Image (cartoon, rainbow, N blue to C red):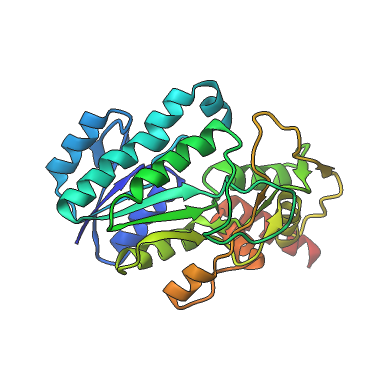
Amino acid sequence: MKVLVLGATGLLGTEIMQVLQERGIRALGAARSGADLTVNIADPLALFRLLVRVDADTVINCAANVNLAQCEDDPEMAYRVNGAPAGVLSAWSQQTDGRFLQVSTDNYFTGTEKTKHDEQAIIGLANAYAASKFSGETMAREAPNSLVVRTNICGARKGFGRWVLDSLTDRAPIGVFTDYYTSTMHVRACAEALADLLVTKHTGLVHLGSSEVSSKAEFVRAVADELQIDPDWIEDRSARGMSPARALSCGMDVSKAESWLGRKLPGLSETVRSLVSEDERCVTHMTSNLAAAG
């Protein structure tokens, strides 16, 4: 099997490349820079030429612009990056019967409840980012051999996970949302699950995330507890009225993915432990604390 990973230098793409290589699966990574292959996925002709040149059995599309403000300022750019490439990949899949995994988002579910949404739940497009990702989903699902995976990830290298770790270990000013709910999972667990789904015949749409729904505030405080830090300076805030607007009730029902995988997906505690143990700075911090306590 030969797998082409688009967005191979991103948080998820990097982890998927590592997991595939550990499993002995031939994987080629493509990105704007720093990968095996260079491509601008916003250029449909360049993407098509890459697909022809690589001649992979499977494509995993992790590439995206996840910056909500940038997408809101330039919806056309958001569509070119987050939506249109799935059309090219869908056509490739239909012509070659190649396996196509489109990584999507959980940023669809409006409301204020801490609830789990399954794959049939009604969605709302609260911003240009969500609209661009949904257009990608729609085009991807035109291919019979495609699987759209909605997820929410964290990791110590960058993004939300990095911000949480730095803010807590540096005791930086930090406000946490009590009314913004997600099913965030660690990037390694997500990559392993994607690699497992890769070799199945499952198609359509699936939610992949933590088995538990938590608010951003609950997540941050769970990380603080794992780090043995008293987060007494943290301020609770509301995410309502944020700009750009966003879906806030983004918890996912992952029972379908668990059924396909034949195992339970990690909950909040396991996700937090994975995030903390991934980061050497945090491990050193915890060791120092334990030494001082002893």
For the question of whether residue 227 can be seen, the reply is no
Picture quarter containing residue 219?
bottom right
Residue 92, image x and y in percent?
21, 46
Quadrant of the rendered structure where residue 288 is? bottom right
| Quadrant of the frame with the C terminus | bottom right
Identify which residue is drawn at 36% across, 42% down. 7
Residue at (27% x, 44% y) in the render: 89
Give the x, y percent position of residue 247.
Answer: 64, 43
Extreme bottom residue here?
262
* Residue 185 percent coordinates (x, y): 56, 58
In percent of width and height, residue 31 lies at 32, 37
Q: Is residue 247 above or below residue 263?
A: above
Q: In this image, 150 relative to 124: left or right?
A: left
Residue at coordinates 64% horizontally, 38% vertically from top-left?
246
Q: Is residue 21 visible?
A: yes
Up the image or down, 114 lies above or below 176; here it is below
> Would you place residue 139 above or below residue 213 in this image?
above
- Left or right of 239 on screen, residue 202: left
Looking at the rendered structure, the number of numbered marks drawn on it comes to 0
Q: Is residue 226 left or right of residue 188?
A: right
| Left or right relative to 45: residue 81 | right
